[in-house]
Image: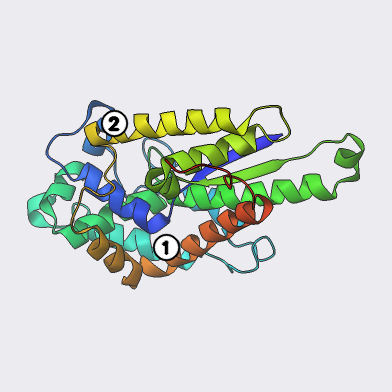
C-alpha cells in the first residue's frame, strides 16, 4: 500500500492563508470566512461537542515517534493560541458584530495574521485546524508504518505500507522535479520509462505555471511582505514555539522520504 501525504511548512502556510483570505472579494468556495467563528474549539453548531484538542494533541505528545521533535504542541500551547484568538475576535467595540472576514480586513496586518493563524491551529469544527491535522497525520502515518513493519502478521501476508511525504512548497517552487518524484514513487518497480515520466512532469509544470499566474489561490511570489510576515510569526511568543516545532516535524517527515528515495528524480533532465 502506498500513501502520499501532502504537507506544507506551517509558517509559509499561515502567511499564505492570511494573504489569500484578507481580500475584499471573497471567492465563491471561500464564503465560510463570512460566518465561521475562528476561535471555536469544540464540534457542533453550538460549540458544545467534543474538544478538537482531544483528537489531535495525544499524537502530538508522543515522544518516541519522531525523537528529534519532542511534544510539538502542548495543551498550554493550544490554550495560549485560543486565548489570543478570543482577544482579537469580536473584542473591539467597532468589531463586536463583525464576521471573520471583516476582521481580516479591519485588523492591522499582524493582528489579522495572528487571527487567521489561530483558525488554522485551533478551529476544529469546520474548515480550520489544518496545521494540527497535518501534524497529527504525520505522526499517525509513522505509527502505522511501524505497526506494519514490525508485525509478524503483515510480514507473513507480505503486506507493506510506504508513505511518501510530499512538500507543497517544493511542488510550487519546482513543479516538474516534484511531480517527477511523485511519479517515481507511484510507479516504483513498474515498467514505466523515465522519459515518459519526464514528459508528463514537464507538461504538468507548464500547466501549473499557467494556472498559478491566473489563479488568486496561489499566493507564492505575489506579495512583497511575505518574508516580513514569516519572521513575525516565527518570532511571536505565542505562535512561534508551536509553529517552529511543527516545522521541525514536517522537515523530519520530509527527510525520511528523502533518505528512502535518494535516487528519486535524479535522472530528471533540465530543459
Q: Residue 74 at what x, y percent from top left? A: 51, 65
Element on which disc 1 rests: helix
Q: Within the image, what quadrant is residue 35 found in?
A: top left
Q: Earlier in the sequence, mark 2 or mark 1?
A: 2
Q: Within the image, what quadrant is residue 70 found in?
A: bottom right
For image coordinates 37% across by 49% down, the residue present is: 120
Quadrant of the snapshot with the C terminus = top left
Quadrant of the snapshot with the N terminus = top right
| Residue 169 falls left or right of residue 60 | left
Marks 2 and 1 in Cβ contact (< 8 Å): no
Circle 2 sits on which residue? 210
For label 2, count other residues whose C-alpha is less than 10 Å away and answer few (under 14), some (14-19) or many (20+). Answer: few
| Picture mark count | 2
Instruction: Tell me if residue 245 comes above or below residue 103 in the rendering.
Output: below
Element on which disc 2 rests: helix
For the residues marked 2 and 1, what is the alpha-carbon distance in whole angstroms?
32 Å
Q: Residue 59 at what x, y percent from top left? A: 61, 55
Q: Residue 191 versus residue 56: which sits nearer the camera?
A: 191
Circle 1 sits on which residue? 243
Q: Residue 93 versus residue 125: which sits nearer the camera?
A: 125
Amino acid at each position: 500500500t502506498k500513501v502520499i501525504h501532502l504537507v506544507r511548512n506551517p509558517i509559509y502556510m499561515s502567511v499564505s492563508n492570511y494573504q489569500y483570505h484578507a481580500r475584499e472579494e471573497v471567492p465563491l468556495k471561500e464564503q465560510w470566512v463570512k460566518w465561521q467563528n475562528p476561535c471555536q474549539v469544540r464540534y457542533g453548531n453550538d460549540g458544545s461537542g467534543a474538544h478538537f484538542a482531544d483528537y489531535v494533541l495525544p499524537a502530538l505528545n508522543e515522544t518516541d515517534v519522531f525523537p528529534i521533535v519532542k511534544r510539538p504542541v502542548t495543551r498550554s500551547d493550544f490554550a495560549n493560541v485560543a486565548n489570543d484568538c478570543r482577544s482579537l475576535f469580536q473584542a473591539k467595540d467597532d468589531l463586536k458584530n463583525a464576521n471573520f472576514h471583516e476582521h481580516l480586513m479591519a485588523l492591522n496586518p499582524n493582528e489579522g495574521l495572528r487571527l487567521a493563524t489561530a483558525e488554522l491551529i485551533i478551529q476544529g469544527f469546520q474548515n480550520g485546524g489544518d496545521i494540527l491535522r497535518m501534524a497529527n497525520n504525520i505522526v499517525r502515518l509513522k505509527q502505522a508504518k511501524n505497526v506494519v513493519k514490525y508485525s509478524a502478521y503483515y510480514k507473513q501476508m507480505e503486506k507493506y505500507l510506504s508513505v511518501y511525504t510530499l512538500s507543497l512548497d517544493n511542488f510550487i517552487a519546482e513543479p516538474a522535479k516534484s511531480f517527477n518524484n511523485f511519479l517515481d514513487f507511484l510507479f516504483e518497480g513498474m515498467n514505466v520509462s523515465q522519459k515518459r515520466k519526464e514528459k508528463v512532469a514537464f507538461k504538468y509544470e507548464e500547466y501549473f505555471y499557467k494556472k498559478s499566474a491566473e489563479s488568486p489561490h496561489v499566493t507564492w511570489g505575489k506579495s512583497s511582505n511575505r518574508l516580513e510576515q514569516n519572521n513575525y510569526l516565527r518570532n511571536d511568543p505565542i505562535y512561534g514555539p508551536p509553529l517552529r516545532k511543527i516545522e521541525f516535524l514536517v522537515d523530519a517527515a520530509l527527510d525520511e522520504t528523502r533518505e528512502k528515495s535518494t535516487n528519486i528524480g535524479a535522472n530528471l533532465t533540465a530543459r
